[in-house]
Image (spheres, rainbow, N blue to C red):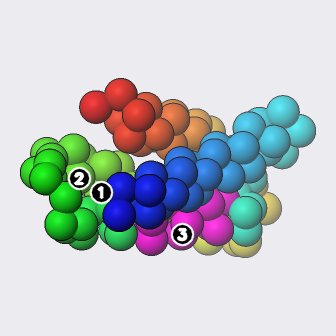
Amino acid sequence: METLRDIVVLIHLVGFAVLFGAWVVELVNGKRGITRVMHWGLAIAAVAGLALAAPWGLDGDLNYAKIGTKLVILLVIGALLGIGAARQRKSGSVSPAIFWPIGLLTLTNAAIAVIW
C-alpha cells in the first residue's frame, strides 16, 4: 500500500511539473499566455492530490493544515488559469498580474508538497 501511495505522490508532483513547465515555456517564449497543457497539469495535480487526501489505512495521521493550504492554493491557481484563459480569448493576451502568480503559486504548492 505504501508503494501505491508513493506512485500517487509521484503523479501529483508530475502534475505540478507539467503546469510549471508549461508556464516556464510561455515565459521564455515571451508570449506569456495560458495554454491547454497548463490546464492538464492542474487537473493531474488536483486528482492525485485528492487521492492523497483520502485515508489510506496507513499508520500516519493526515496533515489537515497542509491539505487545506494546498487545496486553497490549487483553487487560486485554477481561478487564475480560468480568468487568464478568458481574457486571452477576449483580448489576445494575459496581464502580468495574472501570469506571474500562476508560476509562483505552482512552485509554492510543489514546495509545500515536498518540504512540509
How many residues crowd mark 3 within 10 Å: few (<14), some (14–19), many (20+)?
A: some
Residue on which the image places disc 2 = 67
Amino acid carrying label 3: it is Ala
Give the spatial CA distance, label 3 vs label 2.
16 Å
Apparent side of residue 41 relative to residue 21 in the rendered image (left or right)? left
Q: At which x and y percent is residue 94?
A: 67, 52
Foreground pick, 41 / 89 = 41
Percent of width and height locating residue 56: 24, 66
- Can you see residue 83? no
| Residue 110 visible in this rendered orientation of the protein | yes
Residue 5: in magenta span? no
Of 29 and 48, the residue lying toward us:
48
**Residue that numbered label 1 is attached to:** 71
Q: Which residue is mark 3?
A: 43
* Residue drawn at 61 percent across, 52 percent down: 14
Element marked by disc 3:
helix
How far, Cα to Cα, is label 3 from label 1?
12 Å
**Which quarter of the figure is the C terminus placed in?**
top left
Q: Amino acid at mark 2?
A: Ile
Which residues fall within the magenta stretch?
Answer: 38-49
Whole-angstrom CA distance, mark 2 to mark 1, is 6 Å
Residue shown at 44% from the left, 63% from the top: 4
Q: Residues within 10 Å of mark 1 (few under 14, many from 20)?
A: some
The residue under the point 62% across, 60% down is 41
Q: Looking at the image, is 106 positioned above or below residue 68? A: above
